[in-house]
Image (cartoon, rainbow, N blue to C red):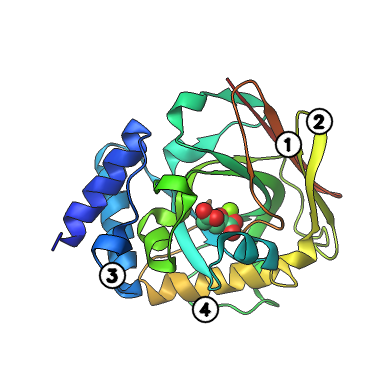
Amino acid sequence: MASNQDIAETLHEAALQAKPIPQISLAHPISLTQAYEIQKLLIQYRLDGGETLIGLKMGFTSEAKMQQMGVHDLIWGRLTSSMLIPNNSKTQINHYIHPRVEPEICFRIGKDINRELNENEVSEYVDGIAAALEIIDSRYQNFKFSLEDVVADNCSSIGFVVGDWMPVSQSLKNLNMELLIDHKIVATGSSNDIMHNPWRSLAAATRLALQYGETIKKGMFIMAGAATNAEFIQANQTSTAMVESLGQATVSFH
Ligand code: OOG
Ligand code: MG
């Protein structure tokens, strides 16, 4: 039986070498608690390598994503400094195994959060909101996983792009969200597809962070989760996430 540390190391190496591995849970049944412990150990490799924790991401906050991946529970992962990609820049395709892109909304935290907040008070702790694009890249073969597998793999995190920051007074109700690849719309949704209200996703992040002993600090980014399916992306393609009234986040793969 592999230890949590062994599993974390295997996942870390898979990401570093951009080489997929078989699903962990097929050989080693793991609990959800164990999966979050593995995720923490996995991130520690990045922190030991000089990266810093810059935020958290929520996953499976929309029906579209739950349907696409066959996983029906909220998950959360950690974002580190190497994952932040400047808007309108390029990223190298060989850094990834089988990357997918998805349109999101990102929150920037304005003051430390040490307790669970509800969806109505959470905006007081935010000083900016932006359109965002997440690049996900499961370390598992064929992008197939169980809930526990994906949690252990830091929820497929690898990169994210954030657009210009907008004031918190900007409403997040019913905003059209689009994912484009090479200027063609490949998926459409609405901000309401994110837990009926993206602020609810941030409230859930405060609950989960507290539950797992993480603090959400001033300056951190919280990704609310995708509003639509994720789409595969290839070399020489450009992808943009557009959020009505907020703006866009774009990255090119080469
Ligand atoms: C897991 C990550 C889910 C989201 O926005 O729902 C996620 C995956 O789909 O590989 O990032
Ligand atoms: Mg996502």
Is residue 86 shown left or right of residue 211?
right
Inter-mark Cα distance, 2 to 3: 42 Å
| Residue drawn at point x = 70 percent, y = 77 percent | 120
- 251 lies above or below 221: above
Where disc 4 sits, the SS reads: loop
On the image, the x and y values in percent for residue 123 come to 68, 67
Asked if residue 35 lies left or right of residue 170, the reply is left
**Mark number displayed over residue 112:** none
Answer few, some or many: residues within 10 Å of disc 4's Cα (few below 14, many 20 plus, some between 14 and 19): some
Q: Residues within 10 Å of mark 1 (few under 14, many from 20)?
A: many
Q: Which residue is mark 1?
A: 240
The front one of 111 and 108 is 108
Residue holding disc 2: 183
* Amino acid type, label 1: Thr
Q: Amino acid at mark 3?
A: Ile
- The earlier-in-sequence mark between 1 and 3 is 3
Q: Nearer the viewer, mark 1 or mark 2?
A: 2
Task: Return the residue at label 3.
Answer: 30
- Residue under the point 78% across and 67% down: 192
100 w.r.t. 44: above or below = above
Identify which amino acid the numbered label 4 is placed on.
Answer: Glu
- How far separated are the C-alphas under marks 1 and 4? 33 Å
User: How packed is label 3: few (under 14 Cα within 10 Å), some, or many (20 or more)?
Assistant: some
Q: Sequence-wise, which precedes: disc 4 or disc 3?
A: 3
Residue in the picture at 77% in, 53% down: 167
**Which amino acid, by three-letter code, is at mark 2?**
His
Q: Are marks 2 and 4 in contact (CB under 8 Å)?
A: no
Helix, strand or loop for disc 1: strand
* Residue 84 rendering spot, x and y as whole percentages: 52, 38
Q: Which residue is mark 4?
A: 116
